[in-house]
Image (cartoon, grey):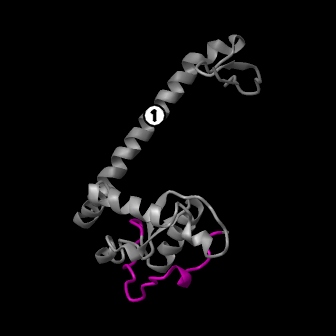
Amino acid sequence: MFVTRCKHSGCHNLVAGNIPFCNEHIADLPAYEERIAKQRSHIKQHTHEYNATARGATDERKQRDSFYHSREWKHIRLSILERDNYICKYCYRFGIVRPANTVDHIVPAQVAPELIRDISNLAVICRGCHSRKTDWERKFYHTGYQSSQKIKKDILLKDISELPNFSK
């Protein structure tokens, strides 16, 4: 059985992993459970609102999201992971070997939906590179669902070597 610290602020007593408070602070349990329930409720409400507005905002977005849950995408994703040996291609081009399990569209699917199934437009990417690349795409292509600017489709960078260094 694992142990953790008591959840009471400043208390360093160890408790069994499934019990949040030590015997000294067990009275804090009801307030803690209420706070956790409130957080879960807030997250659930936010997720529901996000799904209704962002994920279902357009037919194009609905279609793209349904593709990512399809058997076809799961097969494509697995073949790309195996092709790239589960190593981030964005780091690897700078000599860094970093394990990864996310498959990324080099040219975002929002910019070029016709390339969504094109395996030459797919590469394995680590979490850090993916976050930095997404930020860069929002500025370069004006992607993202909060952007009020028109998506820039005139310049498509289709080769990883043309992209900035995201592996910092």
Q: Quadrant of residue 97?
A: bottom right
Q: Quadrant of the C terminus?
A: bottom right
Residue 149 sits in quarter: bottom left
Residue linked to disc 1: 40
> Which residue is the extreme one toward the bottom?
154
Main structural element of the magenta stretch: helix, strand or loop? loop
Q: Is residue 24 left or right of residue 128?
A: right
| 101 sits to left or right of 92 | left
* Residue 69 percent across, percent down from the top left: 30, 54
Can see residue 78?
A: yes
Q: Residue shown at 24%/62% (left/top)? A: 63
From the top left corner, tell me how far across and down residue 141 is, in percent.
Answer: 44, 79
Magenta stretch bounds:
144-167
Foreground: 13 or 25? 13
Q: In the figure, 128 relative to 117: above or below?
A: above
Q: In which quadrant of the rendered view does residue 20 lie?
A: top right
Residue 166 seen in the figure? no
The structure residue drawn at horizontal position 38% and vertical position 41%, both measured from the top left corner, is 45
- Seen as rendered, the residue at the extreme left is 59
Does the magenta segment cover residue 133?
no
